[in-house]
Every structure is written in structure tokens, then in C-alpha cells.
Image (cartoon, grey):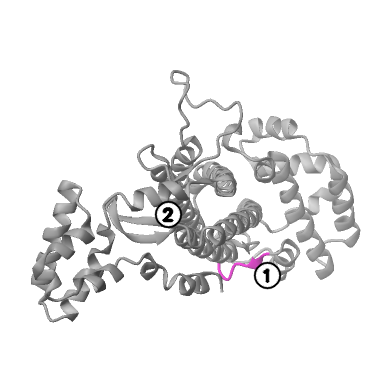
Amino acid sequence: MIPRYSRPEMTAIWEPATRFRIWFEIEAHAANAMAEMGTIPKDAAKTIWDKGAAAEFDVSRIDEIERETKHDVIAFLTHLAEHVGPEARFVHQGMTSSDVLDTCLNVQLTRAADILIADLDRLLAGLKTRAQEHKTTLTIGRSHGIHAEPTTFGVKLALAYAEFDRARARLVAAREEIATCALSGAVGTFANIDPRVEVYVAEKLGLTPEPVSTQVIPRDRHAMFFATLGVVASSVERLATEIRHLQRTEVLEVEEFFSKGQKGSSAMPHKRNPVLTENLTGLARMVRSYAMPAMENVALWHERDISHSSVERMIGPDATVTLDFALIRLAGVIENLVVYPDNMQKNLDRLGGLHNSQRVLLALTQAGVSREDAYRLVQRNAMKTWDEGKDFLGELKADSDVTAKIPASDLEAMFDIGYHLKHVDTIFERVFG
């Protein structure tokens, strides 16, 4: 994660000071649980809480200890003892490092998920507002990048809304799946720590106890979490790519907001480039790339190894920070998107009415013409329009084979644009309720 693509609220989750504070809370909650069960003195648990809560954990001091111990959790516990005093001997009773590390990571991921869900809520609100604004703004739909049939820009945005609504549901599910706690001790058997301690700590941290762990929380949970982030990022890229295509000079149906004083090119002063959506495309690639190592982390040796550790120290912050930045940037793009309905209409009219070809095809079949012959009749007139710039309706009305089956007045009625809009309300009702 780099400052250019980071927001403070998300980066704060991954700061060393935050991590050490969560480690302390895990240890202190565990001490409280043990004190209630009579495993350690209640006075000791109170001292651990009071002195630890008041402590300012010195990251540089912990790093100094770790350089000697070569063990991050031991370095932290040593530093904690410097604050707590003799009662620190009751800290970490029956626990193993992974109890602290894995539970902390899941706290961080759930907090990150909460921010990402809030990001999606802002994006969804923007999409809904703009979709309603352009519910009946006509535009040409494209398949393979080629003009197909009319749609509305509002329908395009409603599609994006539905997609990100699914993204939100997936992220909520991923948050629930990752929000587990494990304080089961070495190899996960609870031999030296009562399972009730795990239940107590989980409740205090807003997690649920892992049903069965080894010495680590199973990494299929984390694989699903990061895979979900990758899918959300793919939706970011899909919408960003749509906007980039629609901003091309030859199309220019929408445009990223271009602020006063903004420069598009160091060489060409006229340029107004889709830099934000291009940036989003690149960021999405990065978020997706973190899903693969998360999946490879699932296969650990026996009850634990630490091959996953270095991976998660990188992908945890990077994936969540990057997606957070991308979602907020995309929300801003949508909120400030400049839409050009006149250009949409101009593009819609470019092919002389060819977007009505399917309607004529269907009418011919309903008039008794075989589908093969109907297709041939429509296509030969469409190609004149395509190749020679003719008016499609005029060509159809001049074709005696067509008018023998469909009167000219009926052909004219088939070019009513309202035909393509008759179910827009149904689509919006399905999406927005």
C-alpha cells in the first residue's frame, strides 16, 4: 500500500500501533476470562488491564526486542511486561502465538470489511440517483462494440447498481465468514486453555469461536474473503471500462468531470482523458491478484506452518486499502459524471434506423415468412443502409417483397422508439423496488 492510493481510515487499521493494541485486548480479555474461572488471580487480571490500557506501546522498542528474539509475539509480550510488571507472568497462559495473530488478523479484516461495505453504500446511492435521473435518457446499446438496439443510460446504471448490490451481499457474507476467533492453544486441542476463554474473548471482540482449529484458523475463510474482494474489484473494472469506452472522442456520451485548472496532457493542451477510470482498471487488477496467494495459503502443513504469514502481512493491508480507495474513487466518478444526452441521440441516429431490424424481422415471420427468408429480406436492406448510408425505413418501404407482407404504414409504426422503452419501469421496479 502506498499513500497515493490510500485513505487514512483504512490504513489506520493496519498500523503497527493498532495491531499491538488489538494484541493487548486479546491477551487482556483472555486474562479476564481466566480470572473469572479462577485460573489466575483477579487482581492480576485487573493490573494487566489497567496498566496495559494506559500504556503507549513503543513500536520501536518492540522492534528492538524482536531483533534479538526473532519472534514478534514474544517481543510484544516482553514489552507488555515492561508496563505491567510481575503480574505479566499471567499473560498468555496456555495460548500460542497464532491465537493472537489469527484473531487479530480477523479483527482487522472485519473492520476493513465494515469500511468497504460503507464504501459500497455510497457508490450504490450515487448509482441510484444517476439511474433515476437518466431513466429515460435514450442511448444505443452495443454488442461486440457495435450498435445493437436502444436502451437508456438509466438502465445501464441500474445494471451497475444491481451488480454492486450483489457485491455488497457477498462482502457481508465474507465478513461473517472471516469474523472468527481461535484461542485453542498449541495444535488446537485446548489442552492448556479452557474453551470458555475462547468464547469469552470472541464475544468481547465481536467474533464467533472457530468450531475447530489446528494451531491456526483454517485459511479457506481467508481465501473466500480475498476472492470476494477480487470479484468486487472486477465489478469496479467493468463499470470503469464502460465509462472509458463511452468517453472516447468518437462516442463522447459521458465524460469524467474535468475540474478547473486540471491538465490532461503534458504535450497536448486540448486533452481531457479518462484518467480516473483508467486508474480504477489498474487498481482492480491489483486487488484481483491478491486472491491467488490467499487461495494458495489454504494448504498448510499439518497443524500449522507459517508459509501463509508473509503473504497475509502484504495482502491484508494492500487488498483492503486498494479496494477502499477504488470504491470511493468510483463513487466520485459516478456522482460527478458528465452525461451528454444529445450525443447519445446523435449516435443512436447514426445508422439510419438499423436498430429496428429485429422488430421488422419478427413482423415478417408473424406475417407468414420463414425465418430464413425474413432474415434475408431485412439484411439486404440493412446492408444498403450500412454500406451506402441509406435510410433503413425508406429502403424497406421500397422493397416490394417486404411491403407485400407488411404495409408501409405498419413499417413506419415499427420505428417508434417508445417500443424499446415499454419495460424500463419493470426493470427499475426489479432493481430498486
Residue under numbered circle 1: 195
Picture disc at residue 315: none
Q: Distance between the residues labelled 2 and 1?
A: 29 Å
Residue 7: where, in percent of width, then height? 65, 40
57 or 159: nearer the eye? Answer: 159
Above or below, 228 relative to 173? above
Could one spot residue 289 in this view of the protein?
no
- For the residue labelled by badge 2, is the local secondary structure a helix, a strand or a loop? helix
Answer few, some or many: residues within 10 Å of disc 1's Cα (few below 14, many 20 plus, some between 14 and 19): some
Name the N-terminal-most of marks 2 and 1. 1
Instruction: Give the side of residue 391 with respect to residue 62, left or right.
Output: left
Residue found at the very far top of the displayed protein: 267
Query: How many numbered discs, if any?
Result: 2
Could one spot residue 274 in this view of the protein?
yes
Above or below, 287 relative to 414? above
- For the residue labelled by badge 1, is the local secondary structure a helix, a strand or a loop? helix
Q: Tell me which residue sits at (49%, 55%) in the image.
A: 232
